[in-house]
Image: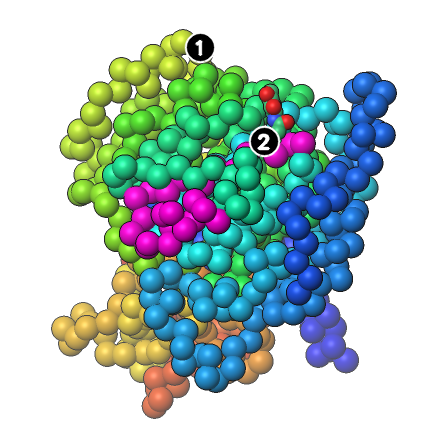
Amino acid sequence: MRRNSVTLIKFLVAAVIFLAAGPFAMKFLFGNKRADEYVDAGLPMAPNEGGFHGKEHKRSSGELQKVDWHDHKQIAADEARVGPGEQGAAVILSPEEEAKKDDLYKVNGFNAFASDKISLQRSIKDIRHPDCKAKKYWNKLPNCSIVVPFHNEHWTTLLRLTYSVINRAPKELLHEVILVDDFSTKPFLKEELDNYMKEHFPGRVKVVHAERREGLIRTRILGAKHATGDVILFLDSHVEANVNYLPPLLDPIAEDYRTVVCPFIDVIDYENFNYRAQDEGARGAFDWEFFYKRLPLLPEDLLHPAEPFNSPVMAGGLFAISRKWFWELGGYDPGLDIWGGEQYELSFKIWQCGGKMVDAPCSRIGHIYRKFAPFPNPGVGDFVGRNYKRVAEVWMDEYAEYLYQHRPHYRSIQPGDLTEQKAVRTRLSCKPFKWFMEEIAFDLVKVYPPVEPKPFASGEFRNRDADMCIDTKYGHEGSNVHLDKCISDSNGGGEQNLELSWHKDIRPSKRTVCFDVSTSVAKAPVILYNCHGMGGNQRFKFNINTQQIYHPISNQCLDCDTGSHELFMNPCDEHKKTQQWIITNVNQTAIKIEWDLPK
Ligand SMILES: *[C@@H]1O[C@H](CO)[C@@H](O)[C@H](O)[C@H]1NC(C)=O
Ligand SMILES: *[C@@H]1O[C@H](CO)[C@@H](O)[C@H](O)[C@H]1NC(C)=O
């Protein structure tokens, strides 16, 4: 009886935490990685067959009105497709095929052999919010040039991208697709690609070849210079566009040319090409080392799941911007080298100079996040740091200092000539960064404070019974945690400098893996999991009177086995010495306040 009610409460608490943590799912996956270059995003139908069903009829009146832009014929044809990878399913290779996949894997960082098994015009699941099916957009929308920079992209992923953006866009809205080759070395990306595009998409797909290795940012700029549509949609080179992806991106721009629109980015699995959502939206942000982060949606955004919502910064490679606004802003700062910081530069200037940025939930684009970067980038030295410094110096005013406090070596990096960038700021009478932080990214500092509060307790966590210390041994996500001889006693190796951090979790100092306990059984295991800062499974408290480390959500205490050196959670018993811990530095004031807080 008691057991059941405890289980129920746990379930409810877990559900609340799950909901609260939902928007952070992406942070778990990608939060602490710097994107690397060029990452970051059956029944064959003739391309564009069908097009926008009934558009002539709807547009004949000439009045401005909202219409249904879905291409129902294309949708029905997609739904009827069967075969490997169709409907966005995973491709399962046979054991013989598995043995052959390595060569292509190495040069692409994803399972390109699996890609080759899938139709270039495969269907993917329509995973948009159901409200998107009924959503209408202006009948007159600006048209669009899609710009796709690539370096050594695999043949079938590049072609599948091309088919998907063309097949799923109303013909009249897609002015052109521009594939920009950043000096690739794969031979098929030269004449063979040019010829394929001329033959299959005459007049619709242009291929531009850079004359030297430019890096991602300058390759995007090169593509933008060739674009002649009203809007430029930048994409990465291994993406697939979902149902009706284009009108939701263009509609907010039709209303204001200074609005920039990002699609939702779904995940195409690098191993088997399964198509899935990574989350149902979050607002883009950053921490003070310039790692890309996510903030939860606001309550009013949650009320309208199919409506665009404001986002402080873009994730990176996938966004639509009117050509006019892009060039008014000076495009990207051409002084940014290779990759890194460009998404912040553009986001800050869009907001500060009078535009806005939104994410459109009804536009979804799947992206392969590579397993590893398959080719070296052409950058020299800490070019990313130099890029960050340029962005900070031009746009961030006094907040640049916070970045430098986290990355002190930026202070001595020479950012190069900033005259032109500062001139953009003056010419467009752009607002100060303080305005951006207070009005747009107003909740950022709560989650990512510029000056990290001190931990509640830190140092070694020594068990009184075992006289040994908790040692995380530089373990990664999924590792178990054990006891080992204390380094302070034995000069041994290991990772024993831990903290009960201001996030109220336990983590090795300067790392972002946390103690995580997901069950409330006796001897429940403690594993390392990426820190989510949301409490729940990762919340711990220290009782300075009993020296117990308490896990409120499971109502258990940290315990250990002095023989096997295992660490686990058990029902609290203040008389058990295996549950008593001596922590080197404890802020008595803070820990008492925290202990008295409700669970
Ligand atoms: C796109 O719009 C421009 C005018 O803004 C026009 O010149 C061009 O023909 C349009 N493209 C298509 C494919 O309709
Ligand atoms: C201890 O915590 C209190 C309350 O949070 C804080 O004001 C104080 O600065 C902390 N002391 C140290 C040494 O960090």
Quarter placement of the N terminus: bottom right
Residue 488 versus residue 11: which sits nearer the camera?
Answer: 11
Magenta part of the protein: which range? Answer: 172-196
Residue 478 seen in the figure: yes
Quarter of the figure with residue 179: top left
- The percent coordinates of residue 126 (x first, y second) are 70, 54
Q: Earlier in the sequence, mark 2 or mark 1?
A: 2
Mark 2 Cα within 10 Å, few/some/many (few <14, many 20+)?
A: many
Q: Residue shown at 81%/18% (left/top)?
A: 62
In the image, residue 476 sits, relative to residue 395, either above or below, namely below
- The percent coordinates of residue 168 (x first, y second) are 66, 45
- The percent coordinates of residue 527 (x first, y second) are 44, 72
> In the image, is 132 to the left or to the right of 505?
right
Query: Nearer the observer, disc 2 or disc 1?
Result: 2
Residue highlighted by disc 1:
429
> In the image, is 293 to the left or to the right of 133?
left
Q: Residue shown at 33%/19% (left/top)?
A: 421
In the image, residue 554 sits, relative to residue 373, either above or below, namely below
Mark 1 Cα within 10 Å, few/some/many (few <14, many 20+)?
A: few
Residue 561 versus residue 17: which sits nearer the camera?
Answer: 17
Q: Residue shown at 14%/73% (left/top)?
A: 491
* Residue 186 magenta-highlighted: yes
Q: Is mark 2 within 8 Å of ligand 1?
A: yes
The amino acid beneath tag 2 is: His
Residue 175: which disc? 2
Residue 517 versus residue 85: which sits nearer the camera?
Answer: 85
The amino acid beneath tag 1 is: Ser
* Residue 243 magenta-highlighted: no
Q: Residue shown at 56%/71% (left/top)?
A: 91
Quarter placement of the C terminus: bottom right
> In the image, is 528 to the left or to the right of 389?
right
Residue 503 seen in the figure: no
